[in-house]
């Protein structure tokens, strides 16, 4: 992404490779699911240590495959190592539970067991964070897995596979296939021996996967796109405007939970727009190989072109371009660099307010009062993360309850390590991360007459 030059060649799996991986995962399941949790935990902590020993190599791979900066890549390492430490503990808390029997004649018990073979498809925007959200609950629960990294960013996930191999994990527990969604994806999502699908990616692919999975009722968890609103009330703290723009631009705007619609209360609108212009004009774009606070390019030519089309669309629709705009930033003729862009006076019906752009493009929308802000925030197909900025605690709780999204971030406080992650509406079904993310990989079995 940074210089448009090839950096590696990887094998492109076909349907037969995908089926081989499935066979291996099925064989591995018998062994892995029968291990005690403490045995599985030992393997997971071996992997965690290997990741920490190889941190620099993994972060370099992320810089090269997707153009994220070194600083930015820390979030990926943190997430995968946290997941490998968190899920064994979360699994230990999943106990057999007694079910009350009104007549008190028999003992009924509910047990949770590994769903079976899980297939995980990854998006490219947080290559290792996404691996962590899948591998942690899969391995802790006793599932075996097939990981299909994004064809645009497979390198860091391939290093994880190497580390698992070097640690001599039992055969078949973890399998990786490369390739695109159409070949390897269809082979697995429509295969009756796959028990669970955990997908992170576009709403388009999520819908196709659900259709395939429906044929034999596989468990499906979908983490899809977003178009988050950041509601800034006039009593917001003094950094709310700049913090909101940074949350939109970071990772070069390629975050599913980015607050890409900034809703600003009218009495502070003019001043906020001026501040946004200054902030975005000064926002640094640079080579991801360089250290420091900046953003790198977006991942691919296709993504670059999509963003450019939408920026032009915003101008054509009559939104007021106050910073950035079409084309590459000065001095960056090579690489898929995008200017941090801000549109003011956006109407929520414009395409730039409705489509997930997945680039550093912010749409600013004025509002009159609380109800109108909530209405605009919820008027979207998506429902992943919304944001609230106000010092009024009662208002926070009132508004947070009314927002139709899986997550609400208040005054810059995001989610905790154990928080479930996921969305309403077209942002997906099910949750990753936290205990909720583990439950997705477990079947519930109730047994009567346990005594
Ligand atoms: P994508 O849907 O194009 O691809 C995601 C993965 O699915 C890739 O591995 C791809 O090969 C595979 N795939 C594609 N079609 C498939 C099919 N029919 N069957 C099986 N697999 C298939 O998405 P992307 O462009 O890589 O990622 C960007 C999208 O991901 C954005 O919409 C973003 O919002 C979303 N995302 C969501 C979350 C979340 O947690 N909600 C996190 C990160 C990214």
Image (cartoon, rainbow, N blue to C red):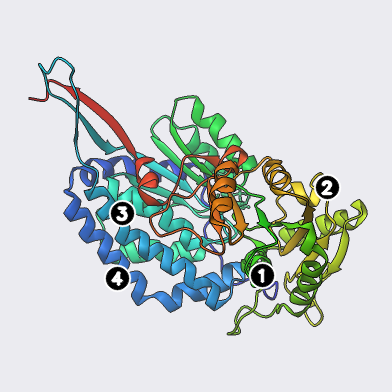
Q: Earlier in the sequence, mark 3 or mark 2?
A: 3
**Mark 4 → mark 3, Cα distance in angstroms:** 15 Å
Q: Nearer the viewer, mark 2 or mark 4?
A: 2
Q: Is residue 22 above or below residue 167?
A: above
- Between the C-alphas of marks 3 and 2, the distance is 42 Å
Q: What residue is pinned by disc 2?
A: 350
* Residue at the farthest bottom position: 291
Nearer to us: label 1 or label 3 = 3
Q: Alpha-carbon distance for marks 1 and 4?
A: 30 Å
Determine which residue is flagged by label 3. Answer: 87
Q: Nearer the viewer, mark 1 or mark 4?
A: 4
* Residue placed under numbered mark 1 in the picture: 1
The residue located at (39%, 42%) in the rendering is 118
Q: CA distance from mark 1 to mark 3?
A: 33 Å
- Please give the label number shown on residue 133: none
Q: Which mark is residue 49?
A: 4
């Amino acid at each position: 992404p940074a210089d448009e030059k090839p950096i590696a060649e990887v094998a492109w799996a076909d349907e037969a490779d995908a089926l081989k991986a499935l066979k291996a995962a099925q064989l591995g399941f018998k062994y892995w699911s029968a291990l005690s949790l403490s045995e599985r935990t030992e393997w997971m902590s071996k992997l965690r240590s290997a990741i920490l020993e190889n941190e620099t190599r993994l972060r370099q791979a992320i810089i090269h495959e997707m153009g994220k900066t070194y600083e930015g890549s820390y979030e990926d390492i943190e997430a995968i190592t946290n997941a490998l430490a968190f899920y064994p503990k979360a699994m230990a808390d999943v106990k057999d539970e007694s079910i009350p029997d009104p007549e008190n004649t028999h003992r009924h018990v509910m047990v949770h067991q590994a769903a079976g073979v899980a297939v995980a498809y990854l998006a490219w925007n947080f290559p290792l964070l996404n691996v962590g959200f899948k591998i942690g609950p899969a391995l802790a629960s006793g599932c075996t897995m097939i990981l299909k990294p994004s064809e645009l960013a497979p390198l860091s996930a391939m290093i994880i596979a190497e580390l698992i191999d070097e640690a001599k994990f039992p055969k078949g527990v973890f399998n990786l296939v490369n390739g695109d969604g159409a070949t390897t994806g269809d082979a697995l999502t429509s295969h009756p021996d796959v028990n669970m699908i955990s997908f992170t990616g576009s709403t388009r692919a999520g819908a196709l996967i659900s259709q395939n999975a429906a044929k034999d009722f596989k468990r499906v968890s979908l983490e899809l796109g977003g178009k988050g609103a950041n509601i800034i009330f006039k009593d917001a703290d003094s950094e709310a405007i700049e913090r909101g723009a940074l949350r939109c631009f970071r990772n070069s705007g390629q975050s599913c939970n980015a607050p890409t619609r900034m809703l600003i209360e009218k009495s502070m609108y003019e001043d906020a727009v001026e501040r946004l212009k200054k902030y975005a004009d000064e926002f640094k774009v640079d080579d991801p190989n360089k250290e420091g606070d900046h953003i790198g390019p977006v991942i691919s030519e296709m993504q670059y072109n999509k963003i450019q089309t939408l920026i032009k669309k915003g101008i054509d629709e009559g939104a007021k371009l106050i910073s950035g705009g079409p084309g590459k930033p000065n001095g960056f003729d090579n690489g898929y660099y995008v200017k941090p862009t801000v549109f003011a006076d956006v109407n929520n019906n414009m395409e730039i307010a409705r489509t997930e752009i997945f680039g550093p493009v912010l749409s600013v929308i004025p509002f009159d009062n609380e109800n109108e802000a909530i209405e605009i925030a919820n008027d979207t197909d998506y429902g992943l993360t919304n944001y609230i900025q106000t010092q009024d605690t009662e208002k926070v709780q009132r508004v947070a309850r009314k927002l139709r999204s899986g997550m609400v971030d208040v005054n810059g406080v995001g989610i905790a390590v154990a928080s479930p992650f996921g969305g309403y509406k077209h942002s997906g079904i099910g949750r990753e991360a936290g205990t909720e993310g583990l439950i997705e990989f477990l079947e519930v079995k109730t047994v009567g007459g346990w005594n």
